Image (cartoon, rainbow, N blue to C red):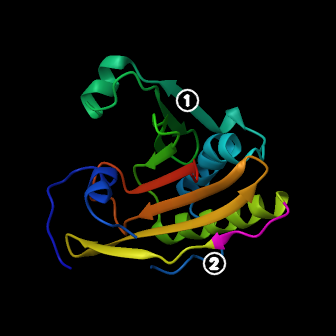
Amino acid sequence: MEMSLPKVPLIVACGILACGTPAFAEGPVEARAKDGIDVFFDFCGSVVTGVTRPIQPERFKPTKLSDKTVRSIRPEAKGQTYWNFQGLESGLMALVHFEPAGICAVEISEADEASVRGAFATAVTETAAKLGNAADRQPDKVTMIEGKPATYSSWRIKTPRGDVLLALTTYPEPRFMIQHLLTASHVR
């Protein structure tokens, strides 16, 4: 299915479409991708799975966004707290927030897609191992947006708190306000 959308955030595009496979990177991970994955697993992953990871505040500058700023970028996000995370060395720019439905999300503005996918898959496997379980990989879903594949990948992990879904939606280039979306949630 081929379609053209206006320049909207990838999160919005994927909310409208069934997003969902580029290859996973092997080898060195691009710095912004590594930082984005670390922010996700340090915050969202640890909150949802219960597997804590050491937070390295010297690597990031977190800034709580004002209500006015949140309303200007996400008018539908009434009363939600958004944090902007800047990678001090990598140049990462990411938004972190919790959705009312219990979903923790990290939105990465720009990072190498293969690096994001590879680092995410590695971190999922490590998280599952710490829980003594395997990560159950779900089939990828790919949707064409402006001639490029938006890929949704997800893993389900059993935790002491119940099943968790760790997912990411990636896009091959930074064409939108958000290039990659990472989410963590309990499965009901």
Judged from the image, the secondary structure of the residue bearing numbered disc 1 is: strand
- State the residue in front, 78 or 42: 78
Could you say where residue 99 lies in the image, as x and y percent from the top left?
Answer: 46, 37
Q: Residue at x 25, y 57 (%)?
A: 16
**Residue 28 seen in the figure:** no
Judged from the image, the secondary structure of the residue bearing numbered disc 2 is: loop
Q: Amino acid at mark 1?
A: Pro
Q: Residue at x 72, y 38 (%)?
A: 56
Region rendered in magenta: 132-136
Rendered image: mark on residue 62: 1
Mark 2, Cα crowd under 10 Å, few <14 / some 14-19 / many 20+, is few
Residue 135 higher or lower than 55, as above or below:
below
Q: Residue at x 27, y 54 (%)?
A: 176
Rendered image: mark on residue 107: none
Placement of the N terminus among the 4 image quadrants: bottom left
Q: Please identify the quarter of the rendering in which residue 164 is found.
A: bottom right
Q: Please identify the quarter of the rendering in which residue 127 is found.
A: bottom right
What residue did someone put label 2 on? 26
